[in-house]
Image (tube, grey):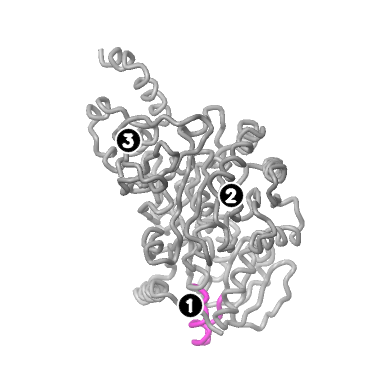
């Protein structure tokens, strides 16, 4: 049995082959979560084997090992697995290898003509580079939903990375329009979580600081209430800060009468697999996860994503939201309950994004930055700026003003006015009463520091401050 390729997947394969034909050694394919990256590289692997080539697929998680193996099998590709806990088949032309296992055993690295690097945004790490360096004659193929890194370092050779061409597939908006993904309705608080006292390490918030800030049960209570209100009994993934936070969230949902369980590194592999399987079958309604299922989870039934972990990482945010975008029977949408304002920071799931292999400087817009941000309706729904009506209640998009929302209650985020905000002159901005999301978009477009937004919000509440500053 072989998997039938979708038209856009066939197109991506054709463009990758054109890159190789143009003497590119290492193209990377950018395709959204749920669009079938694994199916694409499985088809390419099958084609390579038909020509007598050998293929190595590099993955870094147990879940991704099994996912790659399943998609290769569906494409009719015989293969072996090089990873702890799996039976070996060294004679097969295709091998799926765990980076951790191969990184410790470079002497056991199989011969290969093509190295496929799954989740290629990780490939700057030394372990990945050592494996690639051990097969210098092999072609590379990177695949990722988000070809960027939080540290701003590019994935391209010119920026010290591995790749020399970028093939960009259709975005989330286009795939949703074609019915390959479901639309997302996002809900966020009126104001983002106050993170002034939270330190940053390696480009993202320090977990210990986040746990002290929001791991005290306050957000957990809101999470249960909002889930009951917006997505009652839909299979849901809750992304948490730490093991303790995940356990706390799961317990709060169980106390409210829901079938909930935590999934984290403290569980055995069998127990983690059972938890994910329970989410797929309906045995579990809410799975509270800590750093486990952002990548590699393929459960189309997931109808709600609950964001309880603030992050500076666009990659992490898009991976988490993407867990729920796959279609399933009876599923018409994904509900995103964003308690920490990640959507306001990173943009709508289906916003157009600009990808680059070059990386960025400290003051440049990050790769993947949304071309347009969002506005929040009084009902709590967030919509992209391209929408003139709220996706939830149908209310007309308001003018440039701060929208009052009861603290602690999420409001829907929909996608149009923030695009216009980017082009305002400074004087026009001063004459407008912009929402926090709009001010963040204005600041992002000009490279202003985050404190500027807080300062401007205070000025809007007390116009005398602006007058004094102007004087």
Q: Main secondary structure of the magenta part?
A: helix
Distance CA(mark 2)–CA(mark 1): 41 Å
Q: Are marks 2 and 1 in contact (CB under 8 Å)?
A: no
Say what secondary structure mark 3 lies in: helix
Q: Is residue 209 left or right of residue 34?
A: right
At which x and y percent is residue 245?
A: 68, 41
Residue density around tag 2, few if under 14, some if 14–19, many if 20 or more, within 10 Å: some
Q: Earlier in the sequence, mark 3 or mark 1?
A: 1
Is residue 71 within the magenta segment?
no
Residue that appears at 39% across and 43% down: 361
Q: Is residue 325 left or right of residue 64?
A: left
Tally of numbered tags: 3
Q: Which residue is mark 1?
A: 44
At which x and y percent is residue 137?
A: 50, 74
User: Residue 108 falls in which quadrant of the image?
Assistant: bottom right
Say what secondary structure mark 1 lies in: helix
Q: Earlier in the sequence, mark 3 or mark 2?
A: 2
Q: Earlier in the sequence, mark 2 or mark 1?
A: 1
Q: Which residue is mark 3?
A: 442
User: Residue 106 falls in which quadrant of the image?
Assistant: bottom right
Magenta highlight range: 41-55
Indicate which disc residue 232 carries: 2
Indicate which disc residue 126 carries: none
Depth check, mark 2 against mark 1: the one in front is 2
Residue that appears at 39% across and 36% down: 437
């Amino acid at each position: 049995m072989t998997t039938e390729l979708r038209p856009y997947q066939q197109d991506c394969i054709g463009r990758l082959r054109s890159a190789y034909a143009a003497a590119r050694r290492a193209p990377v394919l950018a395709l959204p979560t749920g669009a079938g990256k694994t199916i694409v590289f499985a088809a390419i692997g099958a084609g390579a084997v038909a020509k007598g080539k050998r293929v190595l697929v590099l993955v870094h998680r147990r879940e991704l090992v099994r996912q790659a193996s399943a998609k290769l099998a569906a494409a009719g590709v015989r293969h072996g697995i090089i990873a702890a806990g799996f039976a070996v088949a060294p004679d097969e032309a295709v091998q799926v290898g765990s980076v951790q296992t191969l990184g410790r055993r470079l002497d056991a690295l199989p011969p290969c003509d093509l190295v496929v690097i799954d989740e290629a945004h990780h490939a700057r790490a030394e372990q990945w580079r050592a494996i690639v360096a051990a097969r210098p004659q092999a072609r590379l193929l990177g695949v990722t939903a988000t070809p960027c890194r939080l540290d701003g370092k590019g994935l391209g050779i010119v920026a010290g990375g591995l790749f020399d061409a970028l093939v960009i597939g259709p975005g989330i908006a286009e795939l949703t329009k074609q019915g390959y993904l479901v639309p997302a309705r996002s809900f966020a608080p009126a104001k983002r979580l106050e993170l002034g006292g939270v330190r940053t390490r390696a480009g993202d918030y320090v977990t210990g600081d986040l746990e002290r800030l929001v791991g005290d049960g306050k957000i957990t209570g809101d999470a249960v209430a909002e889930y009951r209100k917006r997505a009652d009994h839909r299979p849901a993934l809750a992304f948490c800060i730490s093991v303790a936070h995940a356990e706390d969230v799961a317990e709060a949902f169980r106390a409210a009468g829901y079938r909930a369980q935590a999934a984290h590194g403290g569980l055995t592999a069998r127990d983690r697999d059972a938890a994910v399987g329970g989410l797929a079958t309906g045995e579990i309604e809410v799975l509270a996860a800590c750093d486990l299922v952002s990548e590699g989870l393929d459960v189309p039934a997931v109808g709600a994503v609950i964001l309880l972990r603030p992050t500076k990482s666009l990659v992490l945010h898009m991976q988490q939201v993407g867990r729920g975008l796959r279609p399933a029977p009876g599923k018409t949408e994904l509900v995103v309950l964003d308690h920490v304002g990640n959507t306001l920071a990173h943009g709508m799931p289906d916003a157009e994004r600009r990808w680059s292999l070059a990386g960025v400087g400290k003051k440049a817009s990050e790769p993947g930055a949304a071309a347009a941000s969002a506005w929040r309706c009084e009902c709590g729904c967030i919509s992209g700026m391209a929408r003139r009506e709220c996706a939830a209640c149908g209310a007309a998009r308001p003018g440039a003003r701060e929208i009052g929302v009861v603290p602690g209650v999420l409001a829907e985020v929909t996608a149009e006015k923030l695009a216009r905000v980017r082009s305002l002159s400074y004087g026009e901005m001063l004459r407008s009463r912009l929402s926090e999301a709009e001010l963040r978009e204005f600041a992002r477009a000009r490279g202003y520091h985050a404190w500027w937004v807080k300062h401007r919000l205070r000025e809007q509440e007390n116009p005398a401050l602006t007058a004094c500053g102007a004087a």
